[in-house]
Image (cartoon, coloured by chain):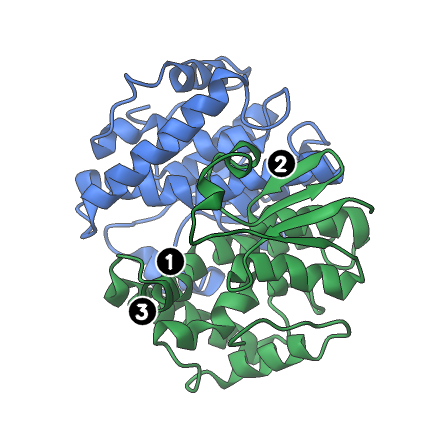
Chain colours: A green, B blue
Amino acid sequence: MAGMKLHDLELSGNCYKVRLFCSLLGLPIKIEPVDFLAGAHKKGPLSDKNPFCEIPIFEDGNVTLRDSQAILVYLARKYGGEDWLPLDPAPMAEVISWLMVAENEIARGPNDARLHDKFGYQLDVDLARKKSERILGLLESHLKNNAWLALDRPTIADIACMPYVALSHEGGVPLEPYPAIRAWIARIKSLPGFVSMPAL
Amino acid sequence: MAGMKLHDLELSGNCYKVRLFCSLLGLPIKIEPVDFLAGAHKKGPLSDKNPFCEIPIFEDGNVTLRDSQAILVYLARKYGGEDWLPLDPAPMAEVISWLMVAENEIARGPNDARLHDKFGYQLDVDLARKKSERILGLLESHLKNNAWLALDRPTIADIACMPYVALSHEGGVPLEPYPAIRAWIARIKSLPGFVSMPAL
């Protein structure tokens, strides 16, 4: 595992997912802060590593990966056994379906609302808040009857979905009406090796 | 494989991904058309199978799955060996990273533009077209140097990303400026067992 490196922004929930999962797995990873305000991710050498010009960018030896969800899959497969991502078709697909919620509903909801409020992104914040309430409602219903998003134990589904949900107050959507979500976040925070990020 | 069933809409690119991949794998699947205009997906029994109130919904015996990308993962793991989704950490993560492009950039780009133009969805179509051009440019650059999105063979990455890219003209974004994308679509169309959908 020598050579694991994360091109990182401390305030990015997507970067935090990678830091958190490495910590839960007890894996050392070298953090390389990206000068995001200066646009370092939009030019070489970072734009050569990720033509999408986004962070996180993850490197492990000669492997380079973009997208926080894909990086979680890599770490789970390489270092996590089947604990965090099972190989049987149905449970694997169940975990993946929640990674898609992180990439879609949570990105378009609480993540977009936070980008507007905290970082000044020009986007339709009313729509983002409406989408936030929809996905938070769905998560609340699910977590009323399930301790974890997929399966009966923590998986990368929880790691992928938690950060922007837990940060939703930074996009103007408080979590007070969602006790099951708050209890789920507390369960994740009590996992051995948990690390936090600002505002969490 | 008795009992595979797809709650389907013929014009949905997400449903089509599942029909296409089953056909490529030579798997019979029972198609159950959903009365989408009547909102059948928003009430029981479908909303019990998928609380997100979306299609496709996939069933295989006692397994029920939502999200087209997750369904592709299930089918690849259960019926496709490692051909379409390898298990080694780096190539698996590479495939997954493209499933995320289907769920994020392609959904927010050509899929949203088509939802506006073809189905009358109220959304910011100028933004969707701008996002379409961005992701099509990224795909064009990648496919200039690669026959397939991930690895050196067709994988579920290609199945997940192709439909809404190939339908982008239905959202007002023609593919004429993207010869490498058009060649990639033609390669997919020539795979044994390929089936089409309307407007493709």
Query: Which residue carries the number 2 mark?
Result: B94
C-alpha span from label 2 to label 3: 32 Å
Query: Which residue carries the number 3 mark?
Result: A129
The kind of residue on which mark 2 rests is Glu
Does residue A183 sit above or below A100 in this rendering?
Answer: below
x, y percentage for residue A142?
52, 72
x, y percentage for residue A172?
34, 76
Name the residue nearer the viewer: B97 or A155: B97
Which chain is disc 1 placed on? A
Name the residue nearer the viewer: B66 or A114: A114
In the image, are marks 1 and 2 on the same chain?
Answer: no
Quadrant assignment, res A98: bottom right
In the image, are marks 1 and 3 on the same chain?
Answer: yes
Do callouts 1 and 3 mark residues in contact (Cβ within 8 Å)? no
The kind of residue on which mark 3 rests is Arg
C-alpha span from label 1 to label 3: 9 Å
x, y percentage for residue B75?
62, 39
